[in-house]
Image (cartoon, rainbow, N blue to C red):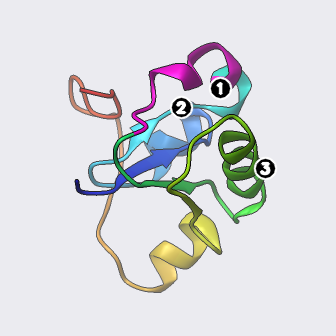
Amino acid sequence: AAPLLVDVRERDEFIRVRAAGAVLYPTSSFLLRFEELPRDRPLHVVCNSGSRSAAVTAFLIRSGWTDVHNVAGGMIAWVRAGLPVRHGPPEAGEGDLS
């Protein structure tokens, strides 16, 4: 299965800049929703710089997920690397786990 990019930044950060195809699971409400995340495909967790996502990655591994990876350097590194991004208000359904 293709990896799922899980963005754990807050909605205002997501609106500013985001990776196409990422699902939004803000750290502030993560504990309420993390059980929805699939266990049968790789998860790549991203935040702004890599620290929140590192904590979430460790939490998911402790909680039984096995294929979880922190995106080192976060969206700062993503943008610097020239990877595709989107800006502005998300389209309907963008950021949702489908």
**Quarter holding residue 94:** top left
Above or below, 77 against 89 in this view is below
| Label number found at residue 75 | none
User: Mark 3 — residue?
Assistant: 55
Residue at mark 2 to residue at mark 1: CA–CA distance: 6 Å
Above or below, 30 against 84 in this view is above
| Label number found at residue 30 | 1
Chain part drawn in magenta: 30-39
Horizontally, is 76 left or right of 58 in the view?
Answer: left
Residue sitting nearer the eye, 31 or 52 = 31
In the rendered structure, are the residues bearing label 2 and label 1 in contact, judged by CB atoms less than 8 Å apart? yes
**Label located before the other in sequence (3 or 1):** 1
- Secondary structure under the numbered disc 1 in the rendered image: helix
**Quarter holding residue 71:** bottom right
Above or below, 72 against 57 in this view is below
Horizontally, is 97 left or right of 67 in the view?
Answer: left
Say what amino acid the circle numbered 2 marks: Tyr
Q: Position of residue 12 (x, y in %)?
A: 56, 35
User: Mark 2 — residue?
Assistant: 25
Above or below, 77 against 9 in this view is below
Q: Position of residue 66 (x, y in %)?
A: 55, 51
- Secondary structure under the numbered disc 3 in the rendered image: helix
Q: Residue at x 56, y 56 (%)?
A: 46
Q: Position of residue 21 (x, y in %)?
A: 27, 49
